[in-house]
Image (tube, rainbow, N blue to C red):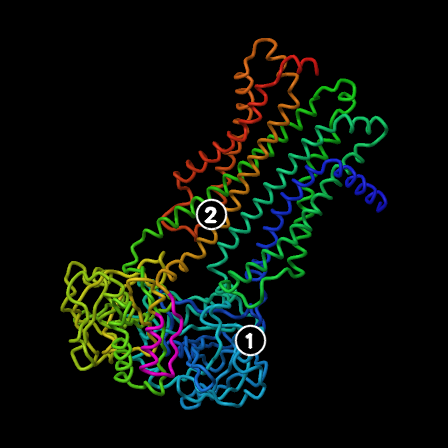
Amino acid sequence: MLDAFVHDVRLAVRSLRRAPGLALVVVVTLGLALAASVATFSVLNATLFETLPYRDPDRVVVFHHTNSSCSPPTFVDYRREARAFESLSAAAPWNANLTGHGEPERLRGLLVSADFFQTLGATAGLGRTFVIEEERPGREHVVVVSHGLWQRRFGSDPGLVGRQLQLNGEPYEVVGIMPPGFAWGRAYGQEAVGEVWAPFALTPERVSETRRGDEFLDVYGRLRRGVTAEQAQADLDAVLAGLRRRFPTRFTEASGFRLSAVPLHEEIVGELRPGLVLVFAAVGALLLVAATNVAGLLLARAAGRRRETSVRAALGASRGRLFRQTLAEAGVLAAVGGVAGLALARAIVAALERVNGATLPRAQPIEIDGTVAAFALAATLVTALLTGLVPAWQGSRADLMAWLRTGAMSGRGRDAARTRRLLVSAQTAVALALLVGAGLLVRSLAVLHGVPVGFTIAGVLAANIQLPRARYDTPPARAAFVERVIAEAAGRPGIVSIGAVSELPLSGSGNSGTFRLEGRPVPAEERQPHAELWSATPGYFDTLAIPLRRGRAFDARDGAETPPVAIVSETLGRRYFPGEDPLGRRLAFEGTVEQPRWREIVGVVADVRDRRLDREPEPQVYVPMAQRPAAGLSVVARGAGDPWEMLPVLRAAVRAADADLPLFGATTLERLAVDDTRGRRAARTALGGFATAALALAGLGLYGLLAQAVKERTGEIGVRMAVGARPADVARLFLADGAGVIVRGLLAGTILAAVGTRLMRGLLYGVTTTDAATYVSVSAVLGLAALAACALPAWRAARVDPLRALRAE
């Protein structure tokens, strides 16, 4: 058996040496398609199929709250009342300024409950994680650092455990260093993983009922052994029912408030999954097009070798032997293409790791590991079968003796021609489906780019500051710092306008909460008023050119000692003051139920798309920075030229106000807007590239089909011309033949696109998967390209010399 296999491979290699052009075309076609498939699968393997570096990660869930996070007192309720969970933990973003060890540096981090690492199922590489006592007030000045920070900043010194670091101006003892495989931040991925973690102290002030509307915590849970997802959700429904009985105006069912537990892996890759699956499906489709193209080439080769095959059959070769020989040739070509594709895939993966790797939610590098290599082998074997089975079947079933006797095309030969037509129609169908997907994404991005964001993004630079609690523990101290930075930078060359805000639009940060309206108690069956709550300086609205619809913006009158005021967005005005003018009305989100701190609404501004470009704005409330100064803020500046030229001015202004504070996360609003559509643009680029390749392959397949038909029907063309057919009639004959193949492919492709584009619903905005304009335009482009591929064979058919054709017959 092995000897026969080796013999077939040797014959296949010898045969392909006599057709180097065909072999090169097939190897390049399959190599490129397999390289794209393997590279894409390596990304999926590192993200969707990644095994999380935690103990029993399938038991870890993330709590989802409708339109909000969780407040500290509500988290305490979850801990006390939930029964399906072995542990419940909370986390909040924490930016820590590291000083005393060289240049000041801002570190990404989280404030977490003491059992956070136990809930995730992670242990320290050196030292320990937190104990429950360190969650209590006064015991929280300990910290766990990441392996990366330990290496980068402290030279992998094992003596770091037990030493103190100055974070935000306060001493923290390092109690542990996490292992290299651990990664977790507010988001999971190399761009956002935490570098430091400190305990979140549940102080009496934080868990008081006055903080019930202060929603900023992310909640994680570890399911008890044996507890199913359905049982966990039932437990959460019971907890929520209890909260609704206690707080009928806050967690109402009519408001749409929901509480659910999402598996950790789903939380990590959930938004990314549709795009990755779509790209992988597109790559699979491209591989299918390449395989059918190669199958068509091998069919044409088999048709040209009928006399040789007939002689071999006459000398005693069995149909099985002929079948194996053709399949062996396809296998050799696929194997060489697979090796070339794997080598190219390694280069593509290395480029992806350098360019876009950090944006993917994963802890391990993208690489060609054993799983990816196994996929490459399987893809190569499948490709060999797809490319070789049809030509082998057709070649072994042909009426070879009839060909040997007459040289004429038998019924089996016509069957082979019909098979090639079906393959080209299939290529056309897949190409149409890919082009429709790319077209829908192009239209979706065009609609998204036209969505009004509510502010000007051109020429605006933003950078972040985190004020340490130790030195800026009072609102007046924080407000004075902000005023000094703005005063230092304002009027400097290149700066037209400058301001500051607590949450920067499109940056991913947010601060939402509930509020009360004066004179309007909320009935139990209605939703508690809810809004994004931001602090801003007077210059913020001018810097971002946020339109003022009514009233006034903040100015020097709105100081710490003046009556509290607020500016609201148009959506808030429409939702909570329908048919009324909100100016002069009062709302409160601070103070107590008995003594709320009422704020007069002095202005109404346009809605700002703060979270995502594709997300409708929520109600928004702005308050003066002087009256509610934030510890974490973003400075925004607009200039007349390159926005990056303002960065040295902002750094100097911060250094003049406090030399120990780093200015971090500098970016432009244009970059934030571009990053917001990065996933859609990546899918569009990938899908567009695959669609273009599929279109080219389909065109080549159609060209090869008609060119082979002209060759095989030369005698028929001579007869037609001899009895009076004009060259134009012959050209129309072959154009009609090609048009029939195209039409069948377009019809099948329309059905395929209607089904396949369901995968990309989550990536579309303002466009449906059945958008008629996209289907019509793409079909027209594909049809014209396909007819262009038919033109040259038809022209050659029209130029056939009838005398030579008849003489050859």
Which residue is found at the position 72% from the left and 34% from the top?
393
Q: Position of residue 303 (x, y in %)?
A: 70, 28
Quadrant location of residue 649? Answer: bottom left
Q: Is residue 648 magenta?
A: yes
Q: Give the residue displayed 39% in from the left and 58% down from the top.
A: 674
Quadrant housing the N terminus: top right
| Magenta extent | 647-667
Q: Is residue 22 above or below residue 410?
A: below
Please give the name of the residue rendered at 36% of the width and 52% of the height, measured from the top-left corner: 448
The amino acid pointed to by label 2 is Arg
Tell me the quarter of the picture where residue 541 sits.
Answer: bottom left
Residue name at image x 61 percent, y 51 percent: 35
Crowdedness near tag 2: few (<14), some (14–19) or many (≥20) residues, C-alpha within 10 Å: some
For this orientation, the residue located farthest to the top is 723
Q: Which residue is mark 2?
A: 758
Element marked by disc 2: helix
Question: Picture coordinates of residue 736 (x, y %)?
Answer: 53, 23
Question: To which residue does mark 1 refer?
Answer: 121
